[in-house]
Image (cartoon, rainbow, N blue to C red):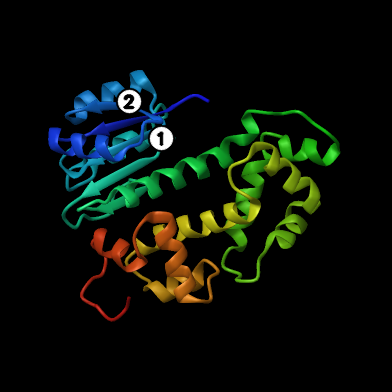
Amino acid sequence: MEESKILIIGSHEMRADISVCLCKRFIKLEARNEIQGWRMALKEAPDLIILGAEVCGIDGNFCRLLKADPRTRHIPLILLSAVLLTDTDADVSLCEPLTNEKLQSCINNIFRLRKTFSYHTEDKSIVDAQSCAVGSPDFMAQLIQAIEENMHLARFSVPDLCRVVGISRSALYKKFNMHGGMTVGELMKSLRLKRAAHLLKGKRLNVSEVAWEVGFNDRKYFSREFRKFFGQSPTAYMIANNILFNQPHRA
């Protein structure tokens, strides 16, 4: 299996700390500033970029540059910061001090989700008409759209998803099992949590409201799953993104 490449952009101390945290199955690339990082991102096409806040900047311009350019906008970004930052275009923001467990959990979840999203480009073999439909280039986009449009419904489940996209459960499960990674249920949960993270940056909803908005009617369960996925609680995530306003009781 080809090793994933992770580009670490930041100070010498930050790069050394992250390199220690990363396991040996990753190819580690390093850059000391945004100019060197930009050139390396274009040349090496990394699978993930980890940015120090000193590189991203308070205004998040470097994150926006990476997400605006068609050559790099598909690369997931993890932003590490010891201070509260305003909204950036990073996929995940982690607040220092950073633990090995938190970083590894975040990286693993990003790669698992990415593998599931991209599976349809790797194997187009067909078994029957329904398998062909699942393997078509547009199917994953259709699947994700159906989940996003219905994720606010707490009872929206895999059978409901199958009815919306017009495929049997057996055909859907078969295709997912062929490619490993996430199950259909895990994909649905991941998309809900990603939407929750986006809403937590939005300055309008508290944790309970966000949970309800993405289909979790149990706040404790939502918080537990959010922590598993992002390595920190929803409230900590809000604090790390500087969006708690002056209303400490809303969380």
| Gap between marks 2 and 1 measured at Cα | 9 Å
Q: Position of residue 195 (x, y in %)?
A: 47, 58
Towards the viewer: 51 or 200: 51
User: Which residue does the numbered mark 2 point to in the structure image?
Assistant: 41
Checking the image for residue 65, the label placed there is none
Q: Dot 2, crowdedness within 10 Å: few (<14), some or many (≥20)?
A: many
Q: Residue furthest top?
A: 43
Could you say whether the residue bearing mark 2 is in a helix, strand or loop?
helix
Residue in the picture at 79% in, 46% down: 171
Q: Residue furthest right?
A: 128
As drawn, is 106 to the left or to the right of 161?
Answer: left
Residue in the picture at 17% in, 53% down: 82
Q: Amino acid at mark 1?
A: Ile
State whether residue 223 is above or below residue 137: below
Q: Is residue 167 visible?
A: no
Q: Position of residue 75 (x, y in %)?
A: 41, 35
State whether residue 208 is above or below residue 24: below
Q: Amino acid at mark 2?
A: Ala
State whether residue 135 is above or below residue 85: above
User: Which residue does the numbered mark 1 point to in the structure image?
Assistant: 75
